[in-house]
Image: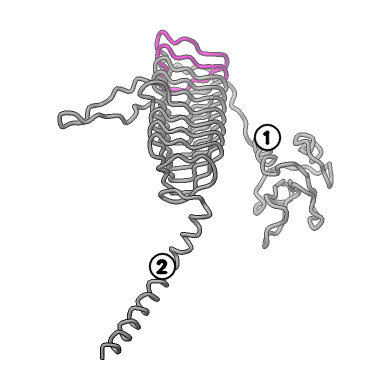
């Protein structure tokens, strides 16, 4: 594709050769003369030898001699070009004769692909252009919308509602029982989990994620939220729109996250916690109280400025301990002299 066409596609502004042909999209360290790359910052990183044929920038760089396309968000433009050059949606393949479709399935839409050994239960409904991979299980009365991609080995249990353009990666279980027990007569009695799960449009869920069904009502993941691999979402949790949940995070039952929340890796959220819109939580933090706004780190969580001050002090503890021991020894000597 020529730079002229790429610029038109991105609605950018070109400085350079409009007829230069681009055949690949690469990161800045690996891009060659036939590739286009992008720049995250306002200037080239130190030590980088720029060999690409063209580069996406936020503002034109006078020190760069290769062709440049100015766009509002270079990383977003880079993602769109990766999709354009490399992501090809497979053509519909129909329903495999080796898939099992129970009697009483409500409906399977147009151009749906169902791979061998998938199992679709009665009462289920599959929307147009959705792809169901091999060894996927879809439970009774579950609804899956249009243009979804369900990768091999996913389990979607009964009474789950999934919106449009949802992506679910392998090994994930949606609608497993919530972890609910009551202790009586010396044993843990299971509380029936009879609610459901609602996953709204444009959600992506990584590999080996578990989203538990509600005890009553629904566990809800709202539109545009992206969930990394190995995340646990407990019963009756509500995650607001366009949030980011990073790997190995665990969210306990009945917690609520607002819009645009970011939980970094290995964050733990206690039950019945409320987190406000736009809150950001650093990796390995433990949340044990409601948070209305801001950025937090640590266990228990603290505002990030306070946490960094305490961390700086923590790193000095060996030095401070040594000084205290020295002062104790001097004090002992002084006290010994005064006694004499």
Q: Give the range drawn in magenta.
A: 102-129
Residue drawn 65% across the image and 35% down it: 83
Q: What element carries label 1?
A: helix
**Which residue of the protein is positioned furthest toward the top in this rendering?**
104
Query: What is the x, y in percent for residue 140?
Result: 39, 15
Give the residue displayed 78% in from the left and 55% down from the top. 64
Front-most of residues 83 and 280: 280
Occupied quadrant, residue 225: top right
Outermost residue, left side? 185
User: Counting other residues with Cα less than 10 Å from the Cα at mark 1, is it few (<14), some (14-19), or many (20 or more)?
Assistant: few
- Identify which residue, 319 or 44, lies in the foreground: 319
Q: In this view, does 219 lie to the left or right of 165?
A: left
Residue furthest bottom in the image: 340
Viewed as shown, does residue 34 lie left or right of 242? right
Residue ID for mark 2: 317
User: How far across and down, in percent of the image, does residue 24 sit?
Assistant: 69, 43
In the picture of the structure, the residue carrying the numbered disc 1 is: 84
Q: Are marks 1 and 2 in contact (CB under 8 Å)?
A: no
Q: Quadrant of residue 269?
A: top left
């Amino acid at each position: 594709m020529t730079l002229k066409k790429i610029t038109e596609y991105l609605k950018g502004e070109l400085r350079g050769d409009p007829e230069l042909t681009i055949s690949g999209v690469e990161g800045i360290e690996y891009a060659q003369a036939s590739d286009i790359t992008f720049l995250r910052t306002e200037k080239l990183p130190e030590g980088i030898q720029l060999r690409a044929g063209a580069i996406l920038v936020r503002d034109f760089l006078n020190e760069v001699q290769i062709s440049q396309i100015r766009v509002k968000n270079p990383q977003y433009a880079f993602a769109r070009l990766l999709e354009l050059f490399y992501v090809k949606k497979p053509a519909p393949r129909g329903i495999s004769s080796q898939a099992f479709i129970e009697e009483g399935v409500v409906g399977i839409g147009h151009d749906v692909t169902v791979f061998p050994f998938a199992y679709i239960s009665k009462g289920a409904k599959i929307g147009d252009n959705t792809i169901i991979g091999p060894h996927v299980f879809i439970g009774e009365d579950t609804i899956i919308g249009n243009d979804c991609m369900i990768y091999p080995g996913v389990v979607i249990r009964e009474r789950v509602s999934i919106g449009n353009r949802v992506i679910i990666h392998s090994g994930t279980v949606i609608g497993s029982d919530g972890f609910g027990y009551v202790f009586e007569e010396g044993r843990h009695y299971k509380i029936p989990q009879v609610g459901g799960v609602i996953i709204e449009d444009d959600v992506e869920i990584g590999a080996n994620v578990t989203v538990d069904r509600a005890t009553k009502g629904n566990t809800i993941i709202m539109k545009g939220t992206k969930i990394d691999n190995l995340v646990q979402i407990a019963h009756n949790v509500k995650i607001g729109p366009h949030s980011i949940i990073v790997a190995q995070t665990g969210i306990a039952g009945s917690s609520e996250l607002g819009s645009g929340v970011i939980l970094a890796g290995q964050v733990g959220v206690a039950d019945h916690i409320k987190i406000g819109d736009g809150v950001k939580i650093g990796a390995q933090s433990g949340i044990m109280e409601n948070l209305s706004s801001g950025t937090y780190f640590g266990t228990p969580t603290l505002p990030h400025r306070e946490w960094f001050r305490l961390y700086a002090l923590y790193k000095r503890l060996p030095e401070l301990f040594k000084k205290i021991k020295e002062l104790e020894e001097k004090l002992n000597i002084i006290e010994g002299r005064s006694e004499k």
